Image: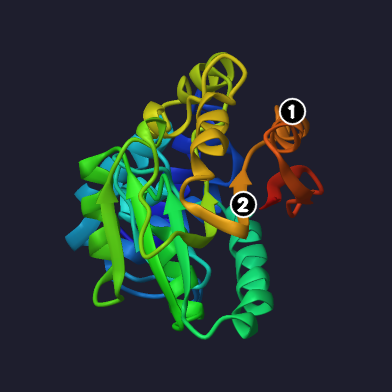
Amino acid sequence: MTAEEARRKALEILLTSSIEAARESPSLDISIILSHLLGVTRSHLIAHPETRIDPVEAAFNDAINKRAEGLPVAYITGTKEFWGIPFMVTPDVLIPKPDTEILVERAIAIIDRMSPHYHEPLRVLDVCTGSGCIAISLKATRENIDIAATDISAKALDVARFNAGRLPVTFIEADLRSGLPTINGGFHLVVSNPPYVPSAAAKNLLADGRNEPSLALDGGSDGLDLVRALVDNVRTSLVSGGTLLIETGEYNAQAAAEYFRVKGFVNVLINKDLEGMDRVIEGTRG
């Protein structure tokens, strides 16, 4: 079978899938899966549609069937790019999303603003690190920071450690509801992409077969259970004048920002994502 023949066959399968996500960008999904299996670029496949796929045909058919059932392409290929860095992903971690790069951008701006005022490397904590994409992206971009990352899931931390490679990131298994670690007098910046999807919405999202961990999505009835716990507990780990950045969603960003204020944070801002939706809450410990 040629790549073009495989593409046409797979396109028919995805376009007739009962899963909406499988029908959204079938040509792109097919191209990514096929290029991954063959070890060639997508542009090579476009230029050479006659390429034989016989050695990977069975694996390709299996992958397309999984995609038709809703499994994300990132879990099929085992990788997802974030901040220009390829990350290994498994169903033990949330797939990194482009909107989370807004949090990384804002964190880097804060690091650059704060660094000149300290004679030591800034200390940064990433809570609910998952694949480690936030902590690793920050360390890869600003080497002069000391960064630690926590997660409640030991399996997620295994993925994060693999992704970090030789980058010096300290990983800690911990439940944020029981408190946050404090290292060398506290952190100057705490960042987090915690579970923030309301339970009912999370259940609906997972019904499409995406297979992402509920633990990383479900934030309780209003989506703010973990956000509130983080805001409550962060004061013992965040230095005075330090900044807290939390990703939330359009469901509850305004309520999250108000909770920041109620708990004594100042200069509270809501940063919008690529689609203009409220996304990252920012506050300074007063």
Name the residue beneath numbered marker 1.
255
Question: What residue appears at the point 49 percent right and 28 percent down from the top-left corner?
Answer: 17
Disc 1 to disc 2, C-alpha distance: 15 Å
Question: What residue appears at the point 41 percent right and 43 percent down from the top-left corner?
Answer: 94
Residue 22: x and y in percent read: 51, 36
The quadrant in which residue 213 appears is: top left
The quadrant in which residue 240 appears is: bottom right
60, 183: nearer the viewer: 183
Q: Answer with left or right where residue 11 lies relative to residue 36.
A: right
154, 240: nearer the viewer: 240
Counting residues from the start of the chain, the first of labels 1 and 2 encountered is 2
* Labels in figure, total: 2
Residue 32: x and y in percent read: 43, 59
Assess whether mark 2 and mark 1 are in contact (beta carbons under 8 angstroms).
no
Specify the label residue 245 is tagged with.
2
Question: What residue appears at the point 29 percent right and 74 percent down from the top-left corner?
Answer: 168
- Kindly tell me whether residue 194 is visible in this rendering: yes
Q: Answer with left or right where residue 222 lies relative to residue 168.
A: right
